[in-house]
Image (tube, helix red, strand yellow):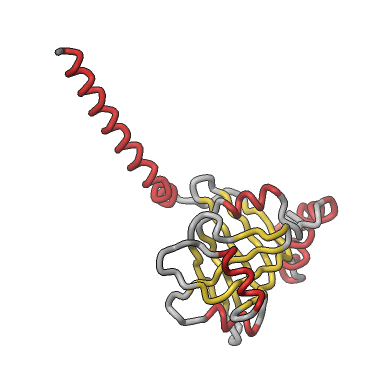
Amino acid sequence: MGRRFQELAFTPLVQQEQQKHGSREQYQRAYDHGKAGDSLGPQEQAFIAARDSFYMASVSETGWPYIQHRGGPAGFLHVLDPKLLAFADLRCNMQYVSLGNLEHDQRVALFLMDYPHQTRLKILGRVEIHENDARAAELLPQLATGEKGAVAERAMLIHVEAFDWNCPQHYTLEELQESLEPVRKRLEALEAENAELRRKIAERTKL
């Protein structure tokens, strides 16, 4: 865990709870000897490039958190540099809850998950929105997902403040099975195809 994530997430009340439950010393040691943790390294960048979805949390004017799922082709969340992410915000249900929240408070938390490998990456950042301006015209062609019928309304830039990896716990068997279902079906199809080829070869051998 990087120092910057602790600085943002471990408020006095959080540290008080850590002290009460016996984890404060270990996190203090991690802070004292850890890296800055405010710049995405090769491991984080590769992980992000392989994801086809993420969750983004924002905070409304009423103080309530709001979580939105974002999906697209793998790599639709671009790493422009170690401290800057970007994606094209596509037209969907036209509620604009996240967009309104970000006008109020630019801070977001991203949650990126790899279910089969039980790996999770958390990113804290601040959003910069470009819509109908020169920067949007420059970015949107680069961020286009190529999805049929997709309408990119704006470019979303996320300035990375901190990140942290989660420990691989609490994944259910059902979640893993769901993630692996396409692979299982493909294997079944290949096995059936191989069986048919073996049958045809055996028949020709008999002739």
Left or right of 94 on screen, residue 57: right
Q: Quadrant of the C terminus?
A: top left
Left or right of 35 on screen, residue 71: left
Q: Nearer the viewer, residue 19 or 114?
A: 114
Q: Quick check: can you spot residue 174?
A: yes
Q: Quadrant of residue 155?
A: bottom right
The image position of residue 33, as x and y in percent, is 84, 50
Residue at the extreme right = 32
Q: Quadrant of residue 63?
A: bottom right
**Rendered residue at 73%/71% (across/down):** 13
Q: Quick check: can you spot residue 16?
A: no
Left or right of 51 on screen, residue 82: right
Q: Quadrant of the N terminus?
A: bottom right
**Rendered residue at 37%/46% (across/down):** 182
The image position of residue 29, as x and y in percent, is 81, 52
**Rendered residue at 65%/70% (across/down):** 157
